Amino acid sequence: MNRKVSVAPMMDCTDRHERYFLRLISKNVLLYTEMIVDEAINRGNKKKLLEFNINEKPVALQLGGSSPKLLSEASKIGEDFGYDEINLNLGCPSKKVEKNKFGACLMKEPNLVADCLSKMQSTTNLPITIKTRIGYDNVEDYENFHNFISILKSTGVKTFIIHARKAMLGKFTPKQNLNIPPLKYDYVYRLKKDFPNEEIIINGGITTTNEINHHLKKTDGVMIGRAAYHTPYLLADIEREIFNNNQIPSRQNVIEQLIPYIKEEIKKGTRLNQIMRHTIGLFHGQTGASYWKKYLSENMCVRNADIKKIDHIMDKIKFNNVDTSVGQTA
């Protein structure tokens, strides 16, 4: 599994439509699902929750939960659906998640997490990975973080994705938790030195290929989050500069390739806005970007969007001088 660069699991963002769209831009970046709760998978509509397009691969399934039994069962189901990796969420700081005992609050219970990881590994052949933070509330010393990772490592887990901020449980909103706690990249660099044989992936506030290259000198991989969602053509820069791939589709090519997918999805009952909302940032920094955002917001990102308008979208781009070149993101 190539985890050199990946796109973070993000609630209400990295659904299957977003992943299909991003895969049209990048062939090498590893993609993650939104977090899906283990109990929902075990007791809910598995097809609705887990089905994805084969063209999205490689794609990892992120699970939320704290029951070894439910997590192991959900992991096996994820394997049966064709996912390439199972990731356990130990980083989400929201009150709702904490109330249900999963996410960052599990950093308080490393032995329970270890039991979960051991059980998950016993039921699937897929790699089990974790995504966590460097601490929580007032527990933010490196030694505690090191000990937490050591306990998880003892289960045989080899890949650790680290959001280089602590989580403020019950005190900040999820949005505040993405910005207010300071980034401590040095914790992640130090972790890699202390665990040279483990795969250490860094995450948090990374927005450019220059930053990615810098972090790759000190870690095994980089996970990007909001930058990939708000400026998705950043993935084209990553293909070119990180993966040395110059076969990059233009922004126009991306939309042209997306249209057949949209039409097939509409036949299945998907609404147009469920797909097109992910493309608003495609032309970020380009001439005509404001027109693109305005047109989508008024015509394709509303609940009752008219599917017929998709047939004219390329004309809208052309006649309003939207820059569709393969140039770098601004």
Image (spheres, rainbow, N blue to C red):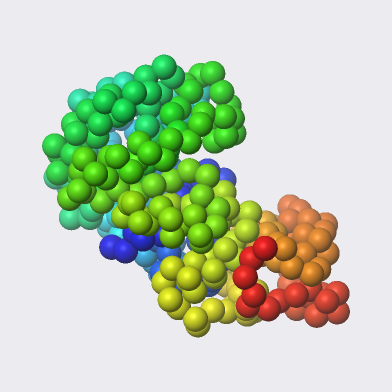
- 61 or 207: nearer the eye? 207
Residue located at (71% from left, 76% from top):
324
Residue nearest the observer in this picture, 2 or 14:
2
Give the residue at the far bottom of this rendering.
Answer: 247
How many labels were placed on the picture? Answer: 0
Camera sees residue 12: yes
Residue occupying the far right of the picture: 319
Quarter of the figure with residue 149: top left
Which corner quadrant holds the C terminus? Answer: bottom right
Residue 82 versus residue 75 in the image, above or below: below
Residue pictured at 77% horizontal, 59% vertical: 293
Q: Quadrant of residue 106?
A: top left
Of the 4 image quadrants, the one containing the N terminus is bottom left
User: For the point 37% across and 65% down, which residue is it?
Assistant: 58
Q: Is residue 246 above or below residue 29?
A: below
Residue 55 in sight in this render: no
Q: Is residue 47 rendered to the left or right of residue 269?
A: left
The residue positioned 41% from the left and 72% from the top of the image is: 243
Q: Percent x, y for residue 89?
A: 37, 38
Pinpoint residue 120: horizontal percent, then vertical percent: 21, 42
Is residue 173 positioned above or below 261 on the image? above
Q: Is residue 162 left or right of residue 314?
A: left
The picture places residue 241, in percent across and down from the top left corner, at 48, 71
Q: Position of residue 154 (x, y in %)?
A: 13, 37
